[in-house]
Image (cartoon, rainbow, N blue to C red):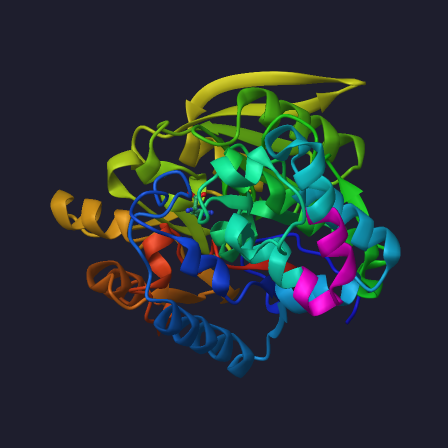
């Protein structure tokens, strides 16, 4: 693999990081799905088939698909990675010292593949090796309660890491259910030999920034959604970090509604071509942006002003073309919810999209965009589309 880098959302996609969903999805029940950020209980075999088909569509277009579970298992052969993985999984405050120690020694005794599986799919009390002696913690916890929480949202690899230029930012995820994803992703980038030279941007312990909020509008221009996930403090420190590393000259902080339907900027807007976005029509006229630019050692903040004009100006183009997802507001709302705006570009003007968003896809095609359709009835139950499920590691220049 050549050195990882990404400067846009649409440059030819060469390498992508994805996660094939596995046993962690089998942990979802009607009782825990809200907390684990899923809207339905996925049929796991079908979700895997859909994911395999998605990966195949990318491979047919020449994309090298790296799978997180495999990278994690490989990275865990390094003893430092193993220690970090075990450390991240054991919450001594919740488990108490004895159970925590049992979990640690169990995790330390299994091979890398098994360990990777446990770190991702979690573990219940019933799955803990049988103990000698008495333990109140074991007796009082229900057999199906988690000793290690599962990570069903690892599927959405875009959120936990994002490449900006030649650096990778491991995200600081806002929701408790996703916190530990940062630790696993961090471990892959720190210890997998493929990434031994990967320079970092931002810091996984900083204020929350999630990759779904980060849009590389053009080389040097980055938009960051601020809403349910990325906080104003996250956007500001992200901007300071990319300025300090010379990765961008302008960061646009874009306020989005703090609600589940628009949890990330990429749920309402993604790029489909050099100068074109697909956007949820209900926000088209109201979306604004604060402009952040470096000013000596500090930053200057302008705006807020209408997003589309501000973005075009920062990108140095006359106007940012918008393809909306259907004039009928009800259809638009339905397809926005089903991630119609969440496309993944494999090249300028060529995107992967969920087939179910019929109107949106028709509009994309009318506008000259090639649409590679995938099915996502099960994958979509976690509220994420092709863009959320992929973290581009290497994109060609525009
Ligand atoms: N980039 C995205 N839109 N990601 C979608 C993430 C969905 C996930 N269930 C969550 O709530 O966090």
Q: Looking at the image, which is closer to me, 76 or 280?
A: 76
Q: Which residues are magenta?
A: 103-115
Q: Looking at the image, which is closer to me, 138 or 44?
A: 138
Q: Quadrant of the N terminus?
A: bottom right
Q: Looking at the image, which is closer to me, 389 or 113?
A: 113
Question: Eyeballing the image, is 315 above or below 76?
Answer: above
| Residue 33, visible in the rendered structure | yes
Overall secondary structure of the magenta section: helix
The stretch drawn in magenta includes residue 110: yes
* x then y, percent, for residue 22: 49, 65
* x then y, percent, for residue 378: 32, 64
Which quadrant holds residue 196? Answer: bottom right
Question: Eyeballing the image, is 263 above or below 349?
Answer: above
The residue at the far bottom in this view is: 60
* x then y, percent, for residue 314: 57, 35
Q: Residue, x 56% and y 52% (percent of image)?
A: 122
The residue at the far front in this view is: 133
Question: Eyeballing the image, is 397 above or below 145?
Answer: below
The answer to whether residue 30 is left or right of residue 318 is: left
* x then y, percent, for residue 224: 54, 34
| Residue 15, visible in the rendered structure | no
The stretch drawn in magenta includes residue 165: no
Q: Looking at the image, which is closer to me, 195 or 369?
A: 195
């Amino acid at each position: 693999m050549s050195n990882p880098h990404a400067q846009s959302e649409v440059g030819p996609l060469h390498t992508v990081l994805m996660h094939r969903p596995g046993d962690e999805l089998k942990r979802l029940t009607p009782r825990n799905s809200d907390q684990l950020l899923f809207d339905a209980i996925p049929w796991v075999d079908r979700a895997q088939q859909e994911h395999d088909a998605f990966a195949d569509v990318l491979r047919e277009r020449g994309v090298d698909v790296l799978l997180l579970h495999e990278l994690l298992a490989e990275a865990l052969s390094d003893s430092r990675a193993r220690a970090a993985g075990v450390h991240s999984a054991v919450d001594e405050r919740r488990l108490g010292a004895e159970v925590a120690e049992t979990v640690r020694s169990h995790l330390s005794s299994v091979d890398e593949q098994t360990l990777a599986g446990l770190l991702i799919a979690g573990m219940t009390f019933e799955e803990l090796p049988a103990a000698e002696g008495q333990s109140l913690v074991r007796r009082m916890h229900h057999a199906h309660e988690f000793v290690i929480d599962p990570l069903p949202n690892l599927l959405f690899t875009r959120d936990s890491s994002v490449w900006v230029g030649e650096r990778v930012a491991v995200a600081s995820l806002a929701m408790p259910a996703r916190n530990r994803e940062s630790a696993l992703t961090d471990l892959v980038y720190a210890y997998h030999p493929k990434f031994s030279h990967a320079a970092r941007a931002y810091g996984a312990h900083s204020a929350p920034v999630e990759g779904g909020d980060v849009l590389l509008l053009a080389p040097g221009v980055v938009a960051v959604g601020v809403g349910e996930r990325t906080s104003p403090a996250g956007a500001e420190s992200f901007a300071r970090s990319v300025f300090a590393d010379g990765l961008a000259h302008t960061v646009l902080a874009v306020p989005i509604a703090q609600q589940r339907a628009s949890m990330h900027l990429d749920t309402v807007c993604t790029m489909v071509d050099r100068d074109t976005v697909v956007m949820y029509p209900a926000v088209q006229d109201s979306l604004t942006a604060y402009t952040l630019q470096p000013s000596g050692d500090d930053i200057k903040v302008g705006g807020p002003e209408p997003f589309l004009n501000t973005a075009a100006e920062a990108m140095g183009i006359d106007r940012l073309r918008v393809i909306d997802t259907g004039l009928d507001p009800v259809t638009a709302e339905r397809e926005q919810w089903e991630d119609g705006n969440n496309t993944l570009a494999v090249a300028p003007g060529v995107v992967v999209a969920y087939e179910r968003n019929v109107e949106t896809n028709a509009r994309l095609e009318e506008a000259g965009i090639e649409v590679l359709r995938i099915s996502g009835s099960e994958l979509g139950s976690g509220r994420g589309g092709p863009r959320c499920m992929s973290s581009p590691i290497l994109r060609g220049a525009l």
